[in-house]
Amino acid sequence: MAKFRREDALDYHSQGRPGKIEVIPTKPYSTQRDLTLAYSPGVAEPCLEIEKNPEDAYKYTAKGNLVAVISNGTAVLGLGNIGALASKPVMEGKGLLFKIFADIDVFDIEIDTTNIDEFVNTVKNIAPTFGGINLEDIKAPECFEIERRLKELLDIPLMHDDQHGTAIISAAGMLNAVEISGKKMSSIKVVINGAGASANSCAKMYIAVGVKKENILMLDSKGVLHKGRKDLDQYKSFFAAEKTDKNTLEEAIKGADVFVGLSKGNILNQDMVRSMNKNCVVFALANPTPEISYEEAIAARKDIIVATGRSDNPNQVNNVLGFPFIFRGAMDVRATTINEEMKLAATLAIAALAKEPVPDYVNLAYGSKNLSFGADYIIPKPIDNRLISAVSSAVAKAAIESGVAKLKITDWDAYRLELENRLGKDNKLMRSLADKAKSNPKRIVFSEADNYKILKAAQVVRDEGIAKPILLGDKAKIMKMAEEHFVDLSDMQLVDPLLEHEDMRNQFGDLLWQKRQRRGLTQYDARKSMRDRNYFGAMMVENGMADAMISGLTRKYAQPIKPALEIINTLPGVSKVAGLYIMVTKRGPYFFADTTMNADPTAEELVDIAVLTANTVKQYNIVPRMAMLSYSNFGSAPGEAPSKAAKAVSLLHANYPGLVIDGDIQANFAINNSLLKEQFPFSTLVDKDVNTFIFPNLAAGNIAYKLMQELGGAEAIGPVLMGLNKPVHVLQLGSSVREIVNMITIAVVDAQNKK
């Protein structure tokens, strides 16, 4: 699980616009006419239509895509009863997950009451605003009654995710784990440690997928639930064993096939695990510390399948696999509730998806060549783009078949395609690259380590397991700065070239002199240049003492680039290096080149830039679909720029027939496929979503990415330096810590691909 520090979390939530969510207009508002239509008097017309037909609220308002995430803060995960207001960051976070995974908008609502009647009445009275309600972090047993009453009162999808989310995901994992173990759901013995809201719902879902109720032993803090106990409420009593001589967890787990922990960390030991039946299953789901660690569990015995709630272990039981897609499917058919049939459908869809061939981008992200159904892969990964179509369509179909849907879907293929296209890939690229980087972190040397932002970014990537930082600079200054800013430098290598490494400086200088002695460089000047940390760092990379270098935060672009070009060779067959920017937008990532290096490339150099860019984009597991841009469309206007663009495309078609590229073409035609198809149906880009743009000169590329960054709100990641045999990446002057972390991630992935 990712490490972080208190200051990091507070900074994340407070910097810039406070919080994690905002409301963004979806209609034009720039003219007086727009405002007249949006508010008074134009807004009266949809109001009157809704008054006549309440269902028209789905037509004229955001209701159909709006969920309320509601809590009173009485059972916040890992924090307990912290109150309504203190729970708000969690509810905002849940809203963020709804949006990035299922494109569902959210208002978070914190209700300051522990009274069931007040809570229910408040939710009932605000419910007309929403198309669905997600209850969150409400303690048991009140949560059972609150959910039951609200489901009776309301006619929109409603679910208490703490109860049902874990139940759905863990039941999917259990189905697959039991199948792999060679057993049947109807015959397994299950021990559930924990008797709260989640445990109650989990047990009911396990029964729904085939476990016999009499084969479940549930424990609370006082021991096994059984009929002889007089302290059980109605919810615990439902799972009380009729006859049992077992009371402790140690006694209950002997001979069990499955253990499910929904309690607290470190209460299950290896001896208990060894006392279970052969081919046992352990789901240690307490967070952040499982009932038993993954490492201890698999060390206890070989015939075991283990799942936890942690992202750094195989088989993470994560509610994000369920709730966004359950609500998506339910709301798309305007279901009046989320019933047991819909929850079961989600469970079965998640279980089935784990048996499908795993997409390359998932394997890539998790550092595996072939993730496949088995003991270490019983549940899909959260970044699997297929979840939205698989789970949402299953839930929607179950809602229709069980009679709770107001809308019917007839073309399921079209619906699945709509789901797949909903999000694009904007929120997935860096997450996927970070996961890939973590699979094999590399040594990154920072030539500007005496800068707070660099130290902070180095700490982040070290804590996240993305990279192994090497800090270059004045040790005393670096350590003082780290102390002042509470940056932890443990496990980081500090290198002070000026005070400690004279022999190495001279050795590096001699190597540089050998490379450039016929270009006017003397041995004295070569050795002297190694006092410059950019030269020293680049030479560390060249000699295998580091895997990549990051520089440029405090210097103009040319200063750190020059040492890299003088020291590190280009890739075989490459005569020019080029700069790439990744523009992260709501429509997905776009790739711009060249944006930093070549002022006025020839047609042949444009070919090199295009090939370098295509190969780089492929490293990110994205198929490049490329437009060679100009101010002309296929020769419609004369000039040097369109002529060399057309020539470059001709050369690329001849020499790289597998590359999807066309031009010369104007940017609007490249982006707007309908326009392209109408005017130029012969283009090889017709019916292709172009994601990569090659610019005719440096001015065009540089201007385009900066305009898109400032006016279009795109996040710019780069520049990624392409063409060198070993990775050196130069930051934008004054980059933020987040931007530095992104570039480090890119550098690690680059280094992985150059090995």
Image (cartoon, rainbow, N blue to C red):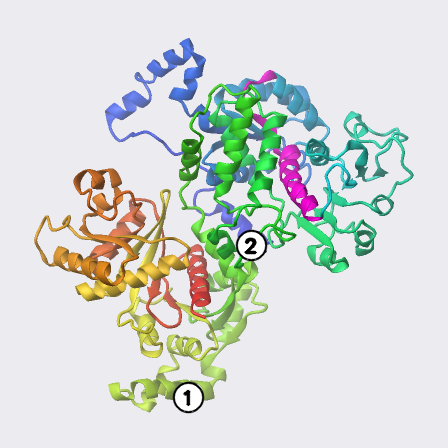
Relative image position of residue 413 (x, y in whole percent): 43, 33
* Residue 504 or residue 483, whichever sits in front: 504
Instruction: Give the vertical position of 415 relative to 358 (above or below).
Output: above
Instruction: Give the vertical position of 332 relative to 57 (above or below).
Output: below
Provide the residue designation for mark 2.
Answer: 371
Provide the residue designation for mark 1.
Answer: 506
Instruction: Give the vertical position of 64 relative to 323 (above or below).
Output: above
Residue 710 painted magenta:
no
Q: Is 648 left or right of 108, judged from the image as shown?
A: left
Main secondary structure of the magenta stretch: helix
State which quadrant residue 711 falls in: top left
The kind of secondary structure element at disc 1 is helix
Q: Which residues are magenta?
A: 153-181
* Residue 211 or residue 446, whichever sits in front: 211
Q: Is residue 137 visible?
A: no
State which quadrant residue 344 falls in: top right
Residue at 49% x, 71% y is: 471
